[in-house]
Each structure stands twice: as C-alpha cells, then as structure tokens.
Image (spheres, rainbow, N blue to C red):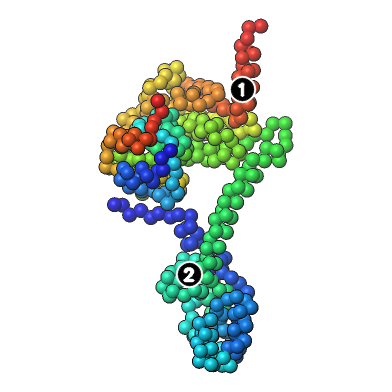
Amino acid sequence: MTPLKEIIKTLNLEAVSSAGLGDPSVVGGYAADLLSCAMKGAKKDYVWVTLQSHLNVVAVASLLNLAGVIITEGNRPDQETIARAEKEGVILLVTPKTTYTVVGELTLMGVRGEV
Amino acid sequence: MAQVLKFTKIQELIYELPIERVMKKGVIRVSPETSMTELKEVLRVNRISGVPVLDGDQLVGVISIEDLIKALVEGDVQAPVRKRMTTRMITVRENESVVEAVKKFAQYKVGRLLVVNEQGQLKGILTGGDITRGLLEAISLDYHAEEISRYRAKHIFEDIASDQTSLILRYKVKTKDFKQGGNASSKIKRALDRLGGVPEVIRRVAISVYEAEMNLIIHADEGGELIAEMQPEVIRIMAIDQGPGIPDVEQAMSPGFSTAPNWIRELGFGAGMGLMNIKKCADSMKLESAVGVGTQLEIVIYLRPESREEQNHEKEKDSEPS
C-alpha cells in the first residue's frame, strides 16, 4: 500500500479537488480512457490514470470508491467537474506527463496493476 | 495553477455554525461597584481569568486577572471594579458565524470574546476552546445523522412487515444528458449502502446500474427510466426506454460491438463493453428489444452471498434431468 500523498509528491501531481480529505492508501493502479474498461478494471482504493477529464470520470471514480484519478497530458477538468468531485469526495490530480510516463513512475513506486 | 476553492468539512462548519451554538451561556459577571477583593474571589472560585462587567443589563467593560495583579501591586484592592476595568471591549454578535470570531481572535490576540445580541446586551462568552468543542460536536452530530439514517434504513424491512416487502426507486434518465450521468447509480449505491449491503455486492450493482444508465443517456431517443426494486434478499433493476430499439440483440451483447458515434467515443464511452460488464456483474440479465418500440433490460443481483448460492443451487436442481 502506498499513501496517495507520497504519489502526489513523487510524481509532482497537482491536486484540483478534495485534497483536504485525508490520505487514502493506494492498493493498485489501472490505466484506460474508456470508462467501461475502467468500470471493469479499476477497484476500490486503486488510482486510475486517464486522459479523460470530464464529469463522468467523477461518477466512475465515486461509484468504484477509487483512491484518486490522475488526469494526464495537461487535460484539466472544468469547474463543474471539480465542484462535483468536491461534493463526492473524489480526488482529482492533474499532470502534464503522458499516461505511459505516469504508469512507469507508479510501477517504480511499487503501485502495481492486476496481472 | 488554477485557483480552486477547497472546503473541508471544518471550513464549511466555521462558516455555517452561528456563534450562539458554541458560546458559553449563563455568563459569570460582576457589577461596576464590586471591589477588587471580591473580584479575586469570583475569579478564584469559578477558576476563570476574567469577567464582563455589567451595570444592570448594560455591558460596560471587562476585568481580568491581569487588572487584579496590577491592583494588588499598587495596593488598590479596595477600589471598585469600575475604576480598574477595561472599557475597550471586543464583541461579536450571537448570530454571526464562527468564522467572524476566528477573525477577531486573530486580529486582537485576546483570549475571550464577548457575545452580544442586536441590542448590545451580553448573551455569552466565547473562547478558542469553545470553538474547538463546538466544531467537534457538530462533526459528530453529522456523523450520527448518517449513522441514524443507516440504522433506520437497515431495519426498514423488519419494521414494515408484509409477506413480501420491496422498496422501489425510480429515476428518470434524460437522453444525451452526460452531466447527470451516474446520478441515479450513485443514489442507488447510497441506498444499498444504507440498507446494509455487502461492499462487494454494492460494487456489482453500482457497475451494472451505471452502464445501464449510460446506455439510456447515450442511445435512448427520449431517455428512459431506471427502476430499482429492492427486497431484503435481492435487487432487481429495470432500464426501460421507448426506442430506437436494438436490431440485433446478440450482436449488441458481443464484446467490443458499439454503435456509438465518434463524439461519444471521445468522451470515453462506446467501448462496446457496457452490456458485457453488466452480464459479468449480474446474477441474471435479460435484454429484450424491438426496433421502433424500445428496449427493456432487467438485471437481478442477490444481495447476500448465501441467497445467491441458494438460487444457483435451485437452478442446478431445475436443470438436472428428471
């Protein structure tokens, strides 16, 4: 288990929502831009890496009780999405890095996906 | 960097709680004619470090242990409080929010604030400790409120007796309304959580309802309806729409098949995995559709692992050749 705070620090991520909500422990990771795939592959307390930054990302993250969502390649959620994330207690993190790089760095930190 | 306002629960409460909810009422007070010797006893007996001075109803000053020490040093202990009190009073209104008090504590570096009403009459006293205590109580009240909701919901099936009790939740889902996408699913998830559902089962319900909800948003001409019928042992979810209908149900069920237009795919939908996801999560699933009429999807999920096994067992028995 890796504290989300440590991931935020090591990967230099910017928290855009719900950052004040304690420090969940991340038990694994999943990457995809298709929401149905995330629905299937991401689990509770996983961190989800995606290019998507729209409102439905929050819905998926909240339904699955994810530890956080890392939105890559400089995509930024709009105010409405951020407001919804605040309401649902979903931690959204943004980075200019690519999904590939983020997943690589997460793996180095010991955050693994399912085999 | 985008400047985003972040509110924690504490911050929210600081803005919401009125001072009167956290202040100490029934304030110990002295009159302007009380002597400094008497004041010493008031402070000692009540273990406090200062008191407001009131002339009848009127707040006229404050006197603290510091003023008392000065009077002792100067041998002026017989003097009335009126002579040695401070008339510079830092007050807050009882109906202001706690944040106003926090600001004044920071601004004036005082240990206590006098709380007054609109007419300037003293209603209470407020210290930093009172604020902390008030916030803690408010937080635990919020927590209890959720606990109570949970408790009540959990017992609803026991409290309301019938041969078969079910709770029906209906949600209208509008076509192409991606902004509301997932709303019905999160409400159903929350309801199940309050009813005391098993997390693993709630997860399967949440995933299948979400996929069904998004299907209505993406595909249904006029939107549709999501109906969740909850019974103690089972949840039955229906997603119903009035068209366009699926020409080939079998094809629609095959993994990766999608009719979503590009703009929807760009949002991350249209993986062609939605119905597959539902099938995997559900204990049983039935999809019926007719072009020009509509589609009806039924999902059944057993809420307790035991009842799921029982059902499977029944099925096995049924399928056994007789």
Marks 1 and 2 sit apart, C-alpha to C-alpha, by: 59 Å
Q: Whole-percent x and y of residue B8?
A: 45, 54
Q: Residues within 10 Å of mark 1 (few under 14, many from 20)?
A: few
**Residue B302: percent from left, percent from top:** 59, 28
- Element type at marker 2? helix
- Identify the amino acid type marked 1: Glu
Q: Quadrant of the C terminus of chain B?
A: top right
Vertically, is B179 above or below B93?
above
Q: Which residue is mark 2?
A: B101
Looking at the image, which residue is at 32% across and 44% down? A10
Foreground: B95 or B23?
Answer: B23
Identified by mark 2, the residue type is Ala
Q: Chain of mark 1?
A: B
Q: Is residue B86 above or below residue A57?
A: below
Report the chain holding disc 2.
Answer: B
Which one is earlier in the sequence, the residue at label 1 or at label 2? 2
The vertical placement of B11 against A89, above or below, is below
Q: Hey, which quadrant is residue A53 in on the image?
A: top left
Q: Is residue B61 above or below residue B315?
A: below
The one nearer the camera, B241 or B312, is: B312
Query: Can residue B220 be seen here?
Result: no
Query: Residue B66, which numbered label?
Result: none
Q: Name the residue: 60% across, 47% down.
A: B147
Name the residue located 62 percent from the left edge and 86 percent from the top edge. B38
Residue indicated by mark 1: B309
Q: Residue furthest top?
A: B322
Residue B312 visible here: yes
Q: x, y percentage for residue B110?
A: 47, 75
Q: Is residue B311 left or right of residue A61?
A: right
